[in-house]
């Protein structure tokens, strides 16, 4: 398995697909990297030579913010929002949707499983 920036990329995938296993690299950037490094994007990752892997690693270090550095940068941005107490920071602190989605229904991914409140009256109890 070729190793880039501390991540093992899968052997059996095409190089352009294998590069997307790195955090911060999508399909477009993966194609761009293959083009800049002069690598055939459809070759399997196991067929890459050490010099080609080194070229990819050098390009990633020089031109892109990926993996640990990008994760750290994202975490710092969120903590800055929390510290200044802006609306988005408060939403992050309360684990609620940040980008204006509704929360009366849905939002289960962000809020977690339902917490049923006991003693709530239903429509049948009003009669």
Image (spheres, rainbow, N blue to C red):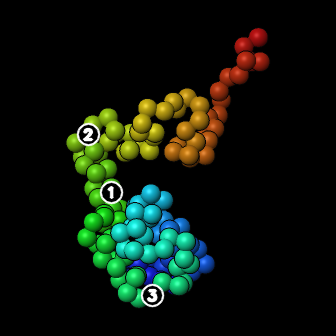
Q: Residues within 10 Å of mark 1 (few under 14, many from 20)?
A: few
Q: Residue at x 31, y 72 (%)?
A: 59
Q: Which residue is mark 2?
A: 85
Examine the rendered structure and indicate whether residue 80 appears above or below residue 24.
above
Q: Residue furthest bottom?
A: 50
Which is nearer the eye, 83 or 74? Answer: 74
Q: Is residue 28 visible?
A: yes
Quarter-wise, where is residue 52 in the image? Answer: bottom left
In the rendered structure, the answer to whether residue 18 lies left or right of residue 59 reads right
- Element under label 1? helix
- Element under label 3? loop
Do the residues bearing badges 3 and 1 touch, measured as CB atoms within 8 Å?
Answer: no
* Nearest to viewer (mark 2 / mark 1): 1
Examine the rendered structure and indicate whether residue 19 appears above or below residue 100.
below
* Nearest to viewer (mark 2 / mark 3): 3
- Element under label 2? loop
Which is nearer the eye, 117 or 29? Answer: 29
Q: Residue at x 46, y 39 (%)?
A: 97
Q: Residue at x 48, y 59 (%)?
A: 27
């Amino acid at each position: 398995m070729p190793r880039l920036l501390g991540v093992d990329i899968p052997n059996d995938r095409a190089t352009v697909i294998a590069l997307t296993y790195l955090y911060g690299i999508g399909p477009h950037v993966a194609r761009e990297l293959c083009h800049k490094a002069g690598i055939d994007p459809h070759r399997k990752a196991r067929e890459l030579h050490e010099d080609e892997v080194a070229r990819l690693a050098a390009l990633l270090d020089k031109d892109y913010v990926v993996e640990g550095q990008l994760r750290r940068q994202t975490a710092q941005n969120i903590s800055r929002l929390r510290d200044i107490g802006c609306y988005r920071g408060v939403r992050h602190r309360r684990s609620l949707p940040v980008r204006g989605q509704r929360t009366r229904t849905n939002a289960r991914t962000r809020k977690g499983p339902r917490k049923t409140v006991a003693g709530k009256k239903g429509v049948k109890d009003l009669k």
